Image (spheres, rainbow, N blue to C red):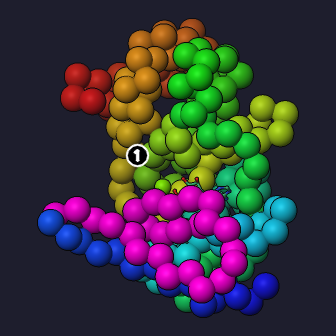
Amino acid sequence: MEDYKKIRVERKETKGKKKLIIHNPTSLKLIGEGSQGAVFQLSEDRCVKIYVNPDAAIKEGKALEAAKDTNIVPKVYEVGPNYCIMEYLKGLNLKDYLKQTKNIPETFIKQIILIRKELKRVGFTRIKTSIGHFIITEGDVLKAIDHSDGLTKNDPYNPKMFRDLKNLGMLDPFLKQVKEIDPEIYEDWQKNIDFTLL
Ligand SMILES: Nc1ncnc2c1ncn2[C@@H]1O[C@H](COP(=O)(O)OP(=O)(O)O)[C@@H](O)[C@H]1O
Ligand SMILES: [Mg+2]
């Protein structure tokens, strides 16, 4: 179980392209990687995210801790110098789901709105929620991952989620439904997000 401490990740830039280099001398399975680090499965319900930058581990640990009572982020178990042990969320991510279905059920739209409100309520100053960072867990319950900048960056209307929906060809139907479900949030987005720049 201590094996994961032997894993190191670093970011290298060659010809302007950033690449994550993973040194994994263990048999732990890589389940995903991003710009900050790589995630390995520890057990049926736990995973560990190993970060390039130790600061990011501390920041993500604090963000997960701040949101822990909302049940919309993975539970956090342990934070170390370059790692964070958290709940492994089993399920398809929303982006892969939408690529297949080309239709976003109302329950997911309601949950997306709620998750963003909850993150704000617990003190997040960056609300990003990329579509690929929602995991559809058991019972069609959405949870959000990747929060290392949640409490530290001032970016409450990050356009990434809307750009993701646009790239999937689903932004207009999504916004139309949001307008009906929660007109206030719809107006708030119209005021603060420039949809022509996505
Ligand atoms: N708690 C989790 N449960 C299941 N998969 C996860 C979890 N956290 C991360 N992942 C997987 O690992 C990938 C990279 O994690 P992420 O937090 O996005 O890293 P980064 O901050 O580097 O972008 C995710 O896209 C997802 O596939
Ligand atoms: Mg990520």
Quick check: 23 left or right of 163? right
Q: Is residue 163 above or below residue 155?
A: above
Residue in the foreground of this view, choosing between 41 and 156? 41
Task: Indicate yes or no whether the magenta region holds residue 12.
Answer: no
Mark 1 residue type: Pro
Disc 1 target residue? 156
Specify the quadrant of the image occupied by residue 6.
Answer: bottom right
Specify the quadrant of the image occupied by residue 149.
Answer: bottom left
Quadrant (top left, top right, bottom left, bottom right) of the C terminus: top left
**Relative image position of residue 68 (x, y in whole percent):** 72, 60
Residue at x 45%, y 54% (from the top left corner): 125
**Relative image position of residue 84 (x, y in whole percent):** 63, 75
Quick check: 139 left or right of 165? right
Q: Give SS at disc 1.
A: loop
Task: Tell me the magenta residue range.
Answer: 16-39
The secondary structure making up most of the magenta span is: strand
**Relative image position of residue 74 (x, y in whole percent):** 71, 58
Specify the quadrant of the image occupied by residue 94.
Answer: top right
**In the rendered image, is residue 70 in sight?**
no
Residue at x 53%, y 41% (from the top left corner): 132
Task: Indicate yes or no whether the magenta region holds residue 31.
Answer: yes
Q: Is residue 48 above or below residue 180?
A: below
**Label 1 Cα neighbours within 10 Å, binned few <14 / some 14-19 / many ≥20:** some
**Relative image position of residue 67 (x, y in whole percent):** 66, 58
**In the rendered image, is residue 3 in sight?**
yes
Q: Is residue 189 above or below residue 155?
A: above
Residue at x 84%, y 62% (from the top left corner): 44
